[in-house]
């Protein structure tokens, strides 16, 4: 497997070839003559790309990127260096050489919101091996997590589930899930889709804990918004009719606030409603300072996982358990100490309060789903205006 460098053109991918937060979508604006790269952002409604960098960052890069929204840094790889760019100024803030004693390349990297580490696949060419690994973006040092090879190759389409601590990638028709602590494979189902031949450009959405992507047919050429069950590998189409014939594997972004999945096809920045599967916007991409826009990411979709877990105002003095979790209709919340005049608040992934139970006493509370939609929520127990316990809860079914 070769590391792909984007120089003169983007590769158009068809089947025949291969809290209310910042909703900005960042990516790389690229000129072909001369070869130049700039950090940029796109307006998904108009397709207008605006360069942030005032001077070129590099001449070429591998076909991947990651965003660290906590430190406001956009990362990409260029000529063996792990380059970090400030997303406000567009200036390079770090560019260490990548070093890995146990692998030749570092590919398929993504930021994990739950522990703020950057995970990816360390790859050997001879023999062909892949290991789950993480990189220190300040030093460029790669540390393997897996102790044995996971696969021989990977598609350039990883995603991270920060809630269940799983890194996903696809290989030879398999949807492989790897525990990010042990580096061991925890799921390896065959990808099956009765309405499509392939499933790619997939991304985990923390708002509803679903992995969305594009299901494709090769005869005729068709592309549908779809979702995959990572445990079974079953792909379910959401779109009822084909969106496009082919797409560019130049990045994927989800806007969880407006419920939109974005991809690029034939020079248009296409947005698809994740409930209906219908196109809601498709402006032509325009950039007066660059030829292409690629490797785009949104730093917003899972940010509240970290915000809730690391809120310095939370002082945890009690422990709670929730069963069942995930839940479909109701759950029992228990504590290791007696509640007394406490309040239970439930927040969605945007930081909005969606449910509240006041004046709780005792050690057990019955939590009713009521009309809450499927997705990830955060439970906070407060007493005297102080958060004494927190827990994540997932609603399904």
Image (spheres, rainbow, N blue to C red):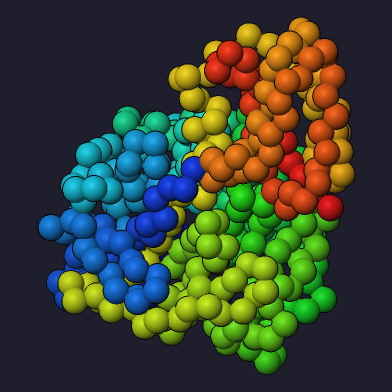
- Position of residue 315 relative to residue 331, above or below, is above
Residue ID at (74%, 49%) = 372
Q: Quadrant of residue 320?
A: top right
Is residue 354 at least partly visible in the picture? yes
Give the number of marks: 0
Q: Which residue occupies the foreground of this view, 362 or 26?
A: 362
Residue 227: % across, % down: 70, 64
Q: Is residue 165 left or right of residue 123?
A: right
Q: Is residue 142 above or below residue 83?
A: above
Q: Is residue 61 above or below residue 209?
A: below
Which residue is painted at 56% across and 36% down in the image?
305
In the image, 114 versus 386, the foreground residue is: 386
Name the one closer to the observer, 388 or 17.
Answer: 388
Which residue is at 32% across, 41% downward? 72
Nearer-the-camera pick, 317 or 103: 317
Residue 123 rendering spot, x and y as whole percentages: 52, 46
Q: Is residue 197 above or below residue 107?
A: below
Residue at horizontal 69 percent and vertical 82 percent from the top = 217
Q: Is residue 137 left or right of residue 123?
A: left
- Residue 17 visible in rendering: no
Q: Residue furthest left?
A: 55
Question: Residue 180: percent from the left, percent from the top?
Answer: 62, 34
Within the image, what quadrant is residue 292 found in?
bottom left
Q: Is residue 272 left or right of residue 232?
A: left
Where is residue 286 shown, x and y percent of the image? Answer: 28, 79
The quarter of the displayed image where residue 322 is located: top right
């Amino acid at each position: 497997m070769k590391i792909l460098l984007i120089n003169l053109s983007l590769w158009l991918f068809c089947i025949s070839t291969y809290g209310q937060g910042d909703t900005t979508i960042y990516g790389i604006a690229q000129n072909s003559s001369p070869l130049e790269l700039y950090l940029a952002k796109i307006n998904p409604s108009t397709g207008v790309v605006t360069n942030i960098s005032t001077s070129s960052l590099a001449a070429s890069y591998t076909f991947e990127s990651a965003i660290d929204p906590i430190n406001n840094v956009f990362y990409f790889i260029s000529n063996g260096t792990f380059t970090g760019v400030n997303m406000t100024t567009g200036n390079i803030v770090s560019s260490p050489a990548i070093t890995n004693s146990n692998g030749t390349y570092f590919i398929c990297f993504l930021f994990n919101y739950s522990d703020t580490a950057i995970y990816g696949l360390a790859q050997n060419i001879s023999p062909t091996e892949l290991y789950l690994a993480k990189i220190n973006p300040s030093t460029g040092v790669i540390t393997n997590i897996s102790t044995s090879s996971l696969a021989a190759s990977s598609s350039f389409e990883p995603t991270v589930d920060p809630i269940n601590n799983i890194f996903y990638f696809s290989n030879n028709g398999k949807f492989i899930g790897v525990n990010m602590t042990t580096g061991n494979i925890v799921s390896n189902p065959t990808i099956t889709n009765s309405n499509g031949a392939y499933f790619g450009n997939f991304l985990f959405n923390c708002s509803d804990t679903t992995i969305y992507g594009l299901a494709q047919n090769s005869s005729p050429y068709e592309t549908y918004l779809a979702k995959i069950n990572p445990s079974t590998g079953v792909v379910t189409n959401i779109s009822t009719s084909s969106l496009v014939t082919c797409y560019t594997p130049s990045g994927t972004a989800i806007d969880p606030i407006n419920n939109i999945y974005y991809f690029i096809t034939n020079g248009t920045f296409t947005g698809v409603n994740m409930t209906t599967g219908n196109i809601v916007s498709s402006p032509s991409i325009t950039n007066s300072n660059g030829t292409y826009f690629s490797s785009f990411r949104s730093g917003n979709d899972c940010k509240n996982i970290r915000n809730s877990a690391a809120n310095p105002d939370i002082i945890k003095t009690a422990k709670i358990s929730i069963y069942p979790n995930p839940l479909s209709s109701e759950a029992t919340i228990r504590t290791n100490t007696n509640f007394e005049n406490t309040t239970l608040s439930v927040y969605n992934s945007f930081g909005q309060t969606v449910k509240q139970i006041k004046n709780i006493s005792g050690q057990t509370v019955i939590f009713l789903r009521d009309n809450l939609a499927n997705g990830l929520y955060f439970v906070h127990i407060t007493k005297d205006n102080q958060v004494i316990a927190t827990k994540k809860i997932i609603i399904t079914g």
